[in-house]
Amino acid sequence: MKPYSREFLANVFAMCDAGEGTKAVALHFKVSESWVRRIKQQRRETGQIAPKIPYSPDLNPIELAFSKLKKLLRDGAKRSVDALWQLCGGILDEFTEVECRNYFRHCGYRYTQN
């Protein structure tokens, strides 16, 4: 592996820690994706960063909203396209701003007002 300055590596690690994808980091710093994957793996193996957690639909706010949407669609039991569209329009009013914010809070996201 080609030696890089500590400052360069610190910038790469900072971008990785910010949650940027491997491809985005590679494009930003003009390095290969495989190099970024290797340094991420080395950091995981040495314990410098926490291991990746597996995907969980319980930690995805979209999954929570879709779950409610599907339940309301099933409860509506409409059988024609027009009736289904009318039902969808009414269902959207069921999602309040506070409820949607709580979906994000439940999943560990922080809400900040600008």
Image (spheres, rainbow, N blue to C red):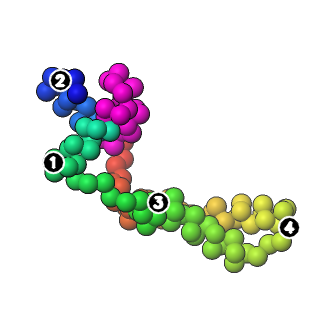
Query: Mark 3 or mark 2: which is in front?
Result: 2
Q: Earlier in the sequence, mark 3 or mark 2?
A: 2
Q: For residue 94, which quarter of the picture?
A: bottom right
Check if residue 2 falls in the magenta segment: no
Q: Helix or strand or loop: what does disc 4 sit on?
A: loop
Q: Find disc 2 in the rendering and name its residue.
A: 3
Q: SS at mark 1?
A: helix
Give the CA distance from mark 1 to mark 3.
32 Å
Residues at discs 4 and 1 in contact (Cβ within 8 Å): no
Side of 77 where 109 appears, left or right? left
Q: Which SS type dominates the magenta stretch?
A: helix
Please name the amino acid that badge 1 sits on.
Thr
- Calculate the distance from the C-alpha at mark 3 to the C-alpha at mark 2: 41 Å
Which residue matches tag 1?
46
Horizontal and vertical percent position of residue 69: 62, 67
Residue lying at 50% horizontally and 66% vertically, measured from the top left: 64
Going by the numbered disc 2, the residue's amino acid type is Pro
Frontmost of labels 2 and 4 is: 2
The structure residue drawn at horizontal position 52% and vertical position 62%, both measured from the top left corner, is 63
Looking at the image, can residue 102 be seen? no
Question: Mark 4 sits on what residue?
Answer: 80
- Answer left or right for 86 relative to 41: right
How far apart are labels 4 and 1 at the CA level?
Answer: 58 Å
Q: Which mark is residue 61?
A: 3
Q: Quadrant of residue 91?
A: bottom right
Viewer-closest of 73 and 40: 40
Q: Earlier in the sequence, mark 4 or mark 3?
A: 3
Instruction: Give the distance between the C-alpha atoms of the residues marked 4 and 3, in whole angstroms.
Output: 29 Å
Of mark 1 and mark 2, the one earlier in the sequence is 2
